């Protein structure tokens, strides 16, 4: 590439990162509104690596916004910031984007930790019931894993080109503007993330309840969670334990980033050990004693001939693999995102796929097909079949710990979505603050915990699966489509990692298929999803159009505070 072109790209990359740096420092960690969209992590440690020429520049928010991306939620005007003061100041807490505490092992703990929750211990029954044979089921699991991998690889390209916290919010904001980004934040913060966390917490509580009240298990896959008809422990007990689990992981994440990531590393080891144990036990049963007769008539005997059945099976498999995008929510906190992010993705995904295939194969070796189809707590049935009641108790503990680890990892990454939304002005600025003592986003964690607890107490999750299938994959589709859009619109954008172009194309096709299936199979529920997402449009214009900004007293809560060049402070939109 010519030297002049290199210089131009470098200046563009610098302007991206400087916008992020200035907005973080000017707010002093207090959640000032920000417009960063970065294309490389070369300057992500800018405290230590500021070019001499750029060091003496004064960067205007307005000019940076025009150079980097259009459509910021707030217009920052022509306020000028001395770069030296913004880069070197440490008057307040260190913004998350500057902490750089996440390494490869932490990344693996987040990606694998979120994916291996309760899904692999419950979803096999759904896949087997729809696929109809061991061979077809294993093939569905393999395809689901590969499709999830295509989405993760597409996100890896976006994460290295735009290494900011917030994941989908940051990518949609840069590619399509603030409205789609706000609608995702609106949907994810109010329903998708807390709803998913509530389900994990309830499942964790029910497994704890089984340890106390019974070792047997209700059918979570086919029944609504936490109803009187399918519980072996009191409903109030499950809700108390679920709320307690949410509060515990919130406290862990509020104390320090190091504590939460180390906790995730411990649970990562437990998850992998549990699945390895299942695989080894299956091999021992296969070698030393007769197992189930699932393969006597052939691997594919009895396979379903309905495409609709395979679609349902694939959806159940993809649900178990969900969580592959979580590392992107904390990309700015990685020590070297341009290298570590794609490395973690391409190490974690094959590990999860292999563990899922091996565990399912072990299930088929030990358990008869009839029991696989009707039981949604296969790991417990597996342990009881091999070791009796003691085995059921051991695997109950393993599944409960797996759920707790997934809850911790989801809490860590989802809080960054709330934090970024506060910094971008999608939420009140207080949620974009970092605590001065702990350097963690305590306000974001508390908001997330509060909404999740509301879901736990409400206790209705049946419609959440349809909501997730339509809304979740709608935003997955838009984000991965952005990979293709950026390839055309910004071909010179530096991409430290570049996936094969067919990868996002394949994922977009699958996402459209899943969205359309949800719409046609549950039209009424899908209509509610559309209404809810679109309800965010007036909320967006209310937030961005000045409605709240002009209200006395309350208006200041919604106008991020910013430090001006003369060391004075003010509010975006004025001090009135």
Image (spheres, rainbow, N blue to C red):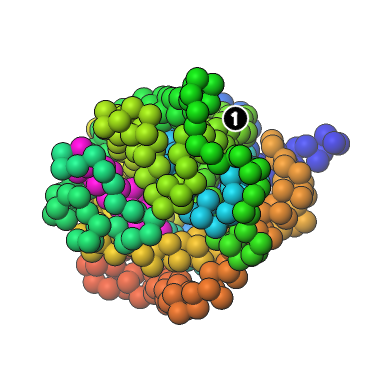
Percent position of residue 510, x then y = 65, 58
Residue 269, by quadrant, is top left
Q: Is residue 196 magenta?
A: yes
Residue 556 visible? The answer is: no
> Residue at left 28%, top 46%?
217
The secondary structure making up most of the magenta span is helix
Residue nearest the viewer, comparing 355 with 180: 355
Residue 234 visible? The answer is: yes
Quadrant in the picture for the N terminus: top right
> Residue at left 69%, top 37%?
497
**In the rendered image of this protein, does residue 435 appear above or below residue 202?**
above
Left/right of residue 522 with respect to residue 340 in the rendered view: left
Question: What is the span of residues highlighted in magenta in the rendered image?
Answer: 191-211
Q: Residues within 10 Å of mark 1 (few under 14, many from 20)?
A: some
> Residue at left 36%, top 39%?
381
Percent position of residue 273, x then y = 42, 24
Q: Secondary structure at mark 1?
A: helix
Left/right of residue 417 with respect to residue 516 in the rendered view: left
Quadrant in the picture for the C terminus: bottom left
Q: Which residue is mark 1?
A: 347
Residue nearest the viewer, comparing 424 with 338: 338
> Residue at left 66%, top 43%?
298
């Amino acid at each position: 590439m010519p030297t002049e072109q290199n210089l131009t790209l470098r200046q563009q990359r610098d302007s991206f990162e400087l916008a992020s740096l200035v907005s973080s420092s000017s707010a002093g960690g207090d959640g000032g509104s920000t417009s960063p969209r970065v294309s490389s992590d070369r300057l992500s440690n800018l405290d230590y690596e500021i070019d001499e020429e750029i060091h003496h520049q004064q960067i205007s928010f307005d000019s940076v916004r025009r150079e980097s991306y259009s459509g910021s939620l707030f217009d920052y005007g022509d306020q000028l910031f001395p770069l030296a003061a913004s880069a070197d100041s440490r008057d307040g807490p260190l913004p998350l984007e500057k902490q750089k505490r996440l390494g490869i092992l932490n990344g693996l703990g987040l990606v694998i930790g979120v994916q291996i929750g309760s899904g692999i211990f419950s979803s096999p029954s759904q896949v087997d019931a729809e696929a109809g044979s061991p061979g077809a089921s294993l093939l569905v699991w393999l395809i689901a894993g590969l499709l999830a991998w295509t989405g993760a690889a597409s996100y890896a390209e976006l994460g290295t080109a735009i290494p900011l916290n917030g994941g989908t919010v940051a990518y949609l904001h840069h590619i399509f503007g603030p409205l789609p980004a706000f609608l995702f934040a609106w949907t994810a913060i109010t329903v998708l993330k807390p709803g998913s966390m509530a389900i994990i917490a309830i499942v964790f509580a029910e497994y704890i309840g089984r340890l106390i009240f019974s070792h047997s298990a209700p059918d979570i896959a086919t029944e609504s969670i936490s109803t009187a008809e399918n519980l072996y422990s009191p409903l109030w007990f499950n809700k108390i334990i679920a709320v307690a689990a949410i509060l515990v992981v919130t406290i862990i994440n509020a104390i320090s980033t190091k504590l939460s990531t180390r906790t995730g590393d411990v649970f990562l080891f437990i998850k992998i050990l549990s699945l390895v144990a299942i695989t080894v036990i299956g091999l021992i049963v296969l070698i030393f004693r007769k197992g189930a007769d699932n393969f006597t008539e052939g691997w594919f005997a009895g396979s379903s001939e309905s495409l609709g059945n395979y679609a349902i099976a694939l959806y159940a498999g993809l649900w178990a693999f969900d969580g592959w995008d979580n590392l992107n929510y904390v990309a700015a906190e990685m020590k070297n995102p341009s290298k570590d992010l794609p490395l973690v993705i391409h190490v974690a995904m094959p590990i999860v796929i292999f563990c899922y295939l091996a565990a399912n194969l072990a299930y088929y070796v030990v358990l008869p097909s009839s029991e696989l189809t009707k039981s949604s707590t296969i790991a417990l049935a597996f342990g009881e079949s091999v070791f009796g009641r003691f085995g059921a108790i051991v695997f109950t503990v393993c599944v409960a710990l797996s759920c707790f680890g997934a809850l911790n990892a989801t809490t860590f990454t989802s809080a960054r979505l709330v934090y970024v939304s506060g910094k971008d002005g999608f939420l009140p600025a207080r949620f974009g603050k970092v605590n001065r003592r702990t350097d963690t986003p305590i306000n974001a964690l508390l908001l997330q915990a509060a909404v999740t607890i509301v879901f736990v107490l409400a206790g209705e999750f049946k419609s959440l699966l349809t909501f997730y299938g339509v809304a979740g994959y709608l935003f997955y589709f838009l984000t991965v489509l952005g990979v293709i859009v950026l390839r055309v619109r910004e071909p010179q954008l530096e991409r430290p990692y570049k996936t094969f172009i067919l990868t996002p194309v394949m994922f977009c096709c699958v996402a459209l298929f899943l969205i359309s299936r949800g719409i046609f199979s549950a039209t009424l529920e899908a209509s509610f999803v559309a209404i809810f997402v679109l309800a965010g449009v007036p909320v967006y214009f209310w937030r961005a159009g000045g409605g709240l900004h002009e209200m006395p007293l309350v208006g200041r809560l919604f106008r991020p505070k910013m430090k001006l060049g003369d060391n004075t402070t003010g509010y975006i939109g004025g001090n009135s």
